[in-house]
Image: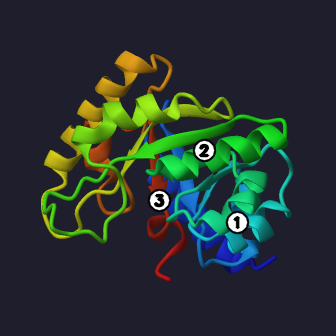
C-alpha cells in the first residue's frame, strides 16, 4: 500500500467528515480513481462508494466485502442495466419509466428489490436538455407510473445543483420534491444532494446523502 497516498486520503477524509453530521450518509465518489484508493477508503472505515460508469462499479465492487454499499449515479443506459442491478445497492439516477420497468424485472430475477432515487432536474434553464432528471411538475405522475413495478424500492430524490449560479434555489426545489414524494411514498425520506463544491448548502436543505469525490481524493 502507498503510505503517502493513504495519509493524503485519510487527512482529506477527516477534514470532510468533520463538516458532515453523523446522521448524513457520505458517499465517496471514486469514479476514475484506482481500486487501490477504494481499498484505502474501506480500510479507513468508509462503506459507501459512488460510481458513474458500470464497468468501474462492477470491477471495484468485486474487490470489497459485502458490507460495502455501492451507489450508481451516472446516466442510465438500458443495455448496462443488468450489470448495474447486479452490483449496485442504490441507483440515484432513475428518470424514465422504461428504465424503471427493466430495473424491476431484473431485480426480481435476482431475488432483490432495487433501491432507487428519482432524479429531479434542478436546472432553472429549462432549455438546457442536456441535464438528466424529470421535471419537478411531472413528479407525481412519474411516481404513479413506476409504483406498479414491485422490484423497485423508491427511497427518495436526487438532484445536481447548478454549476455557475447560487445552488440554494435548486436545493429548495429538491427539498420540496422530497416532501411531495413522501405524501405518496411515506418511507422515501432520502435526499441525495450536494457534491464537493456545494454540499454545505445541500445540508442546509435537508440532504441525507452527499456525494463527494475531489475534496477527498483530489483532482481527476
Which residue is at a point 22% across and 39% down the rendered structure image? 137
User: Where residue 95 sits: x, y (%)?
Assistant: 43, 50
Residue 19 in sight in this render: no
Residue 27, horizontal then vertical, whole percent = 55, 51
Of mark 3 and mark 2, the one earlier in the sequence is 2
Callout 3 secondary element: strand
Locate residue 205 relative to residue 186 in the image: left or right: left
Quarter the N terminus occupies: bottom right
Residue sitting at 20 percent across and 49 percent down? 170
Label 1 crowd bin: few (<14), some (14–19), many (20+), radius 10 Å: many
Q: Which residue does the numbered mark 3 point to in the structure image?
A: 212
Place of residue 113 in the rendered image (x, y in percent of width and height, measured from the top left) = 71, 34
Check if mark 3's residue and mark 1's residue have beta carbons within 8 Å.
no
Q: Nearer the viewer, residue 74 or 161?
A: 74
Q: Residue at x 60, y 79 (%)?
A: 32
Q: Please, which residue is most extreme toward the bottom here?
A: 220
**Based on the displayed image, in which of its 4 quarters is residue 78 positioned?**
bottom right
Classed neighbour count for the residue bearing mark 2: other residues with Cα under 10 Å, few (<14), some (14–19), many (≥20): some
Of marks 3 and 2, the one in the foreground: 2
Q: Horizontal placement of 187 versus 177: left or right?
A: right
What residue sits right under mark 2 in the picture?
Answer: 101
Q: Helix or strand or loop: what does disc 2 sit on? A: helix
Q: 115 above or below 62?
A: above
109 or 188, which is in the foreground?
A: 109
Disc 2 and disc 1: Cα gap in Å?
A: 22 Å
- Relative to residue 33, is residue 149 depicted above or below? above
Please name the residue that numbered disc 1 is placed on. Answer: 57
Callout 1: SS: helix
Decide which of tag 2 and tag 1 comes sooner along the chain. Answer: 1
Amino acid at each position: 500500500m502507498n503510505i503517502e497516498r493513504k495519509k493524503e486520503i485519510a487527512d482529506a477524509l477527516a477534514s470532510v467528515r468533520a463538516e458532515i453530521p453523523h446522521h448524513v450518509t457520505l458517499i465517496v465518489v471514486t469514479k476514475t480513481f484506482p481500486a487501490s484508493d477504494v481499498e484505502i477508503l474501506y480500510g479507513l472505515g468508509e462503506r459507501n462508494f459512488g460510481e458513474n460508469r458500470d464497468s468501474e462499479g462492477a470491477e471495484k465492487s468485486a474487490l470489497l466485502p459485502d458490507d460495502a454499499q455501492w451507489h450508481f449515479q451516472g446516466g442510465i443506459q438500458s443495455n448496462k442495466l443488468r450489470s448495474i442491478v447486479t452490483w449496485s445497492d442504490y441507483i440515484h439516477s432513475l428518470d424514465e419509466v422504461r428504465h424503471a420497468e427493466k430495473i424491476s424485472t431484473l431485480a426480481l430475477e435476482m431475488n432483490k428489490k432495487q433501491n432507487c432515487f428519482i432524479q429531479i432536474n434542478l436546472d432553472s434553464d429549462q432549455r438546457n436538455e442536456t441535464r438528466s432528471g424529470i421535471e419537478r411538475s411531472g413528479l407525481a405522475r412519474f411516481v404513479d407510473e413506476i409504483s406498479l413495478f414491485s422490484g423497485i424500492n423508491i427511497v427518495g430524490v436526487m438532484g445536481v445543483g447548478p454549476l455557475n449560479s447560487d445552488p440554494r434555489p435548486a436545493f429548495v426545489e429538491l427539498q420540496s420534491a422530497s416532501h411531495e414524494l413522501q405524501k405518496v411514498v411515506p418511507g422515501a425520506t432520502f435526499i441525495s444532494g450536494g457534491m464537493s463544491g456545494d454540499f454545505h448548502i445541500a445540508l442546509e436543505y435537508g440532504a441525507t446523502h452527499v456525494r463527494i469525490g475531489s475534496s477527498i481524493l483530489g483532482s481527476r
